[in-house]
Image: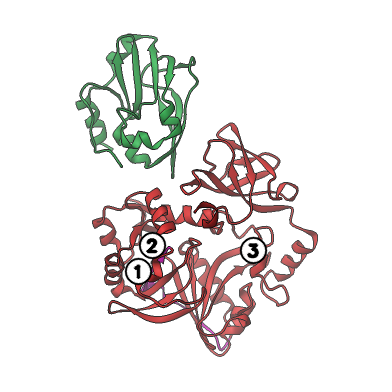
Chain colours: A green, B red
Amino acid sequence: MAATETYPADLKYHREHDWARIEGDEAVLGITWFAQDALGELVHYEAPDEGSTVTKDEPYGEVESVKAVSDVISPLSGEVVAVNQKAVDEPETVNEDPYGEGWLIRIRLGDPSEVDALLDAEAYKQVVAEQ
Amino acid sequence: MAQTLQRTPLHDLHVALGARMVPFAGWEMPVQYAGVIPEVKAVRTDAGVFDVSHMGEFEVEGPRATELLQATLSNDLARIDPGQAQYTLLTNERGGIIDDLIAYELDGFRYLLIVNAANRNADFEWLKEREIPGSDVRDVSDAYGLLAVQGPRSIERLGLPEANAFTFAETDIDGIQCMANRTGYTGEEGCELLVMAEDAPALWERVLGRGVVPCGLGARDTLRLEVCFPLHGQDITPDTDAISAGLGWCCDLDKEFSGAQELREVKARGPERKLVPFVMDEKAVPRTGMPIEGGGEVTSGTHSPMLGRGIGLGYVPAATAGVDSELTIDVRGRPRRAHVVKRPIYKREENS
C-alpha cells in the first residue's frame, strides 16, 4: 500500500515537505513522501475552498493521520482552481501515490517569480537527510 | 539526551521487524509495524499480538492480603475465586481513580495485580503506605514479559482450550511456560500471556510463528476506544470519579474502600458530567482536549478504521449525556457535529 521513497526531479520543493509541479501559469501542490511517511496513514484531508487564495509559506489545509494532524504549507501563492476530491474522499491515496493521484490542490500562480526560491530535488533530499 | 527510556525484553525484535518506536510512559515502545489500520483489522478479523511488557505487575501476599486489597480496590474480591480475575479501580480518598487494573486471585492468600505502566510507581507507593501486618506488596514487574494476543482466532491459533473470560491458567505454548489470562483491552476474544522476562523473546517468536500479526500501541489505542474501554490518564484520572466515568459497575458501594463515601454521594445526587462515547456526523477526527460545546471536553478521540469515521470519549453535562444527544465539537476552531452512542461504539454483529 505505501509508496517507496522518491523525490522526483521534475518537481520543486518547500522545506516544510511540500512539492509543486509547475504547469505554465498554474501549479499542482502536494506533500512529499517524507511528510506522508512521518504522518502515517492519512484519514482526513481538510481542503481549502476552490476560489480561495493561498499564500507562500502559509498553511492552506490540514492532513490528519491516525495519530497526528499537520498543517499543509503552501510553497507558492495563488488562487485555488481545483481541489483533489479523491484525496478528500480517500485520504489514503496520498500515502499510496503522494506525487500522482494524491495531489492536494491546483493553483493559478500569483507571482511566478516565487518558483525561483523553491528547492530542487537534490537540495530537498539534503533537508530530509538532516531530519 | 533526555532521560533514558526503558526497553522491554522484546525491544530488539521490534526493531528487527521494522516497528516505529516511540516513547510511551517512560518506555521505548512499538507504535506500529505495518500500520495502525491493517493491525486493527487483523485483530478484528483474525489475531494480533501486542508487547505490553511495560505494564506493571505486583504480588500481594499474606494472610491479610485480601483485607488490604478490599480496603484499597473498588470491586469486591469476594466475588472471585482462585483462578479468576477482576477489573477494578485503585481509588483515592476523594473517589478519584489512581489507576484501573486487573486483580488475579492466585490463591486465597496471594494476588497478582497488573497495572498501567505510567502508574506503576504511584500505585506501588499507595499500596505500600497502606500495607498492614500480614500483607506484603512486591513490585515484580521486571521479572516478567507480557504479550496480549487478541482477536477472534487468537485462542485457536495458540492452540489453547476454550475458557471463560476473566479466568487464567498455567499453560505451555510450543515449549514455553506461561500464564494465560483470558483478559484484554480490545473487546475481542483473546488472552494476555505472562511469561518470565528471559522467555519472552522465544514466546513472541512462537506466537508470530502461529500466524499472529504483530501490532503496536497505535492499534491498541484505537481498538480499546472502539469498544469504549477507558484509558487512564485521559478518560479517567485521579480527578475523575468512577460514577461519572460510567464505572460504577466495578465499585462495590456496600463495602468500605478509599473514597467509597464520596462515590456514594456522587451516585445519590447524580454526576454533573458523564463520560460518553460519541461518533462524528461530519468528516473530522476528534482529539484529546478539544472542547465540546456546552461545557464538555473530548478525553480520547481517533479515526475508527472499522466505522470509517471519527469516534471518541468525552465528558459532557449530564443533560446532554443521553444516547442520540447531539454534540458540537470544536475541531481547531471549526464546529463539527457528533452524537452520543451506546457502548460499545463498534460491535461485530452490526458490521458483518
Q: Nearer the viewer, mark 3 or mark 1?
A: 1
- Whether the magenta-drawn stretch holds residue B138 is answered as yes
Tell whether position A44 is magenta. Answer: no
Helix, strand or loop under label 1: helix
What residue type is disc 1 on?
Arg
Residue B267 spot, x, y in % from top left:
75, 63
Chain under label 1?
B
x%, y% of residue B1? 32, 50
Quickly name the residue at label 2: B47
Q: Is the same chain shared between marks 2 and 3?
A: yes
Choose top left, top right, bottom left or bottom right for residue A41. top left
Find numbered disc 3 in the image and state the secondary structure of the residue it sits on. Answer: loop
Q: Disc 1 designates what residue?
A: B157
> Which numbered dot is residue B247?
3
Q: Can residue B233 be seen in this view?
A: no
On screen, residue A13 versus residue B128, left or right, reads left
User: x, y (%) of residue B337?
Assistant: 62, 37
- Residue B84 visible in this rendered orientation of the protein: yes
Residue drawn 38% across the image and 62% down it: B47
Query: Circles 1 and 2: CB distance less than 8 Å?
Result: yes
Magenta residues, start to end: B133-151
Q: Residue B15 falls in which quadrant of the image?
A: bottom left
The amino acid beneath tag 3 is Leu
* Callout 3: chain: B
Camera-side mark, 2 or 3: 2
Q: Which of A70 and B129 is in front in this view?
A: A70
Task: Sort mark 3 into few (<14), some (14-19) or many (20+) by Cα contacts within 10 Å.
Answer: some
Would you place residue B314 above or below residue A70 in this image? below
What whole-number distance in Å separates the C-alpha atoms at marks 2 and 3?
28 Å
